[in-house]
Image (tube, rainbow, N blue to C red):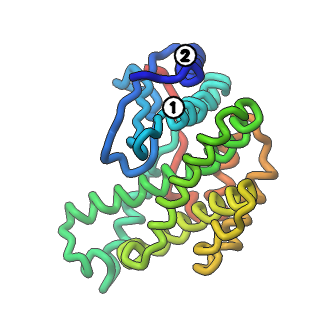
Amino acid sequence: MNLRETTKQFIALLEKKSGLPVHVREVPDLPTIATVLIARGNLPAHIISFKPGMKNETPDYAIIFQCAMAIRTFDCPPDDRKLIAASADGEGIVRGLLTTPNGIAEKLSLSSAQVAEYGERLLMGLITHLRSVPISLRVSETLTLEHPELLEHEVTQAERELRLNRESLAEPIREVTPGRIFAPTQAINTAFALFWAERLERTEIANPYLLAGFEAQGQALLNILAEVPTHPAHDCELIDRWANQLGIQDLYQWLAYRTP
């Protein structure tokens, strides 16, 4: 893979701070732009996956961004490094939301196994969103200040994410998503949209969420972002405060990170 020198430097920095190798792979059917899976347990390397972009669009910024996200974990003292996971009750809570009388499971004629699978997908999607979006805003701020040469690529990626997020507002998705999952997801999307509407001086970016009634929650999340210190040691605090604002603190837990 032909990567730019800056990208190689970020990969090397993550390897240095964590003491573990980084593997990068292209995943055409990835549901989001890029992800990073931090090494743990039986996974001896960090895995960065990226979705191919438009013609002539390189994956460099997506890779840099995921490296920067992971580096924040290793900028914390070893005893303060944590991973997010579903809580012991989380899957049961979501399963209950799906199986209410005349609810989504009945509407979609889901078997018990399908309910469990769909519920897990919904839960982990929300938890991943809760973990990634507030920290991604921190990373965006840092990269803008420290690497202004990446700004054009940063904006391109943000616009792709905004387009993907808007698709989740569609009525067919709302109809098959419990309100306790849908509303927090859209509040987080609103915070992301409001952040970029201000950064790009394009207020229309946030209009779909404002029309859908999510402005107050989205702004409340951004207020929390401004209040919590920016050092990575406060990332878990930031996520917890977003979760408390959204009423979803019972769906996840923090696990101590252990190197493989």
Name the one closer to the observer, 130 or 48: 48
Q: Determine the image quadrant of residue 72.
A: top right
Q: Determine the image quadrant of residue 121.
A: bottom left
| Residue 14 x %, y % | 56, 21
User: Which residue is denoted by mark 2 in the rendering?
Assistant: 12
Q: Determine the image quadrant of residue 198.
A: bottom right
- Which residue is at a point 30% across and 61% down the rendered structure image? 118
In the picture, which quadrant includes the C terminus? top left
Query: Which type of secondary structure does the marked residue at label 1 adopt?
Result: helix
| Residue 220 x %, y % | 73, 65
User: Which residue is denoted by mark 1 in the rendering?
Assistant: 60
Name the one closer to the observer, 156 or 227: 156
Q: Is residue 256 visible?
A: no
Q: Is residue 191 visible?
A: yes
Residue reaching furthest to the bottom: 102
Amino acid type, callout 1: Asp
- Which residue is at a point 75% across and 60% down the rendered structure image? 201
| Residue 5 x %, y % | 56, 19
Name the one closer to the observer, 86 or 154: 154
Task: Please indicate whether residue 148 sits to the left or right of residue 1 in the image.
Answer: right
In the picture, which quadrant includes the N terminus? top left
- Tag nearer the camera, 1 or 2: 1
Query: Which type of secondary structure does the marked residue at label 2 adopt?
Result: helix
Amino acid type, callout 2: Ala
User: Mark 2 or mark 1, which is nearer the start of the sequence?
Assistant: 2
| Residue 52 x %, y % | 38, 41
